[in-house]
Image: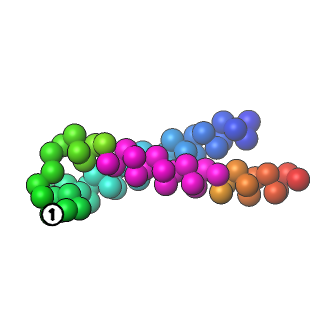
Amino acid sequence: MILLFIMGYELITSALLLTIYIGVEKALGQDASGREASDWVFLISATLAAYFVSLSLTFSLASYVAQAFA
């Protein structure tokens, strides 16, 4: 049950961060180097950023849950 909660939390966090990141990049209209970036670059970079951030959040949440039940 706790694992399902953590997986759901990671999925929601990833989707939220992906949406925010794509919105910011589209608003700026350029990538980090200042060039005009294409849509697939936005998608790949946003997906990777959201994955790594949500992965770290998931591990920190899992450690808090483990401490709560220890």
Which quarter shows the N terminus? Answer: top right
Say if 28 sits above or below 14 in the image.
below
Asked whether, in this view, residue 41 is left or right of residue 69, the answer is left
Q: Between residue 27 and residue 31, name the one nearer to us.
A: 31
Asked whether, in this view, residue 5 is left or right of residue 33, the answer is right
Asked whether, in this view, residue 13 is left or right of residue 7, the answer is left
Asked whether, in this view, residue 45 is left or right of residue 8, the answer is left
Residue 16 in sight from this viewpoint? no
Q: Quadrant of residue 40?
A: top left
Residue drawn at (70%, 50%) of the image? 62
Tally the marks: 1
Magenta run includes residue 57: yes
Q: Is the stretch drawn in magenta largely helix, strand or loop?
A: helix
Q: Quadrant of residue 44?
A: top left
Residue drawn at (25%, 47%) of the image? 42
Residue drawn at (15%, 45%) of the image? 38
Q: Which residue is mark 1?
A: 34
Q: Where is residue 35? Give x, y as percent.
A: 12, 58
Q: Between residue 53 and residue 13, name the one nearer to us.
A: 53
Colouring chosen for the image of the structure: rainbow
Q: Quadrant of residue 56?
A: bottom right
Residue 30 in sight from this viewpoint? yes
Q: Where is residue 48? Give x, y as percent.
A: 39, 46
- In the image, what residue type sits under mark 1? Gly
Q: Secondary structure at mark 1?
A: loop
Instruction: Assess disc 1: are there few (<14), some (14-19) or many (≥20) residues with their C-alpha within 10 Å of its C-alpha.
Output: few
Q: Where is residue 32? Give x, y as percent.
A: 23, 62
Tell which residue pokes out farthest to the right in this image: 70
Q: Which residues are magenta?
A: 45-59
Tell which residue pokes out farthest to the left in this image: 36
Residue drawn at (23%, 45%) of the image? 41
Magenta run includes residue 52: yes
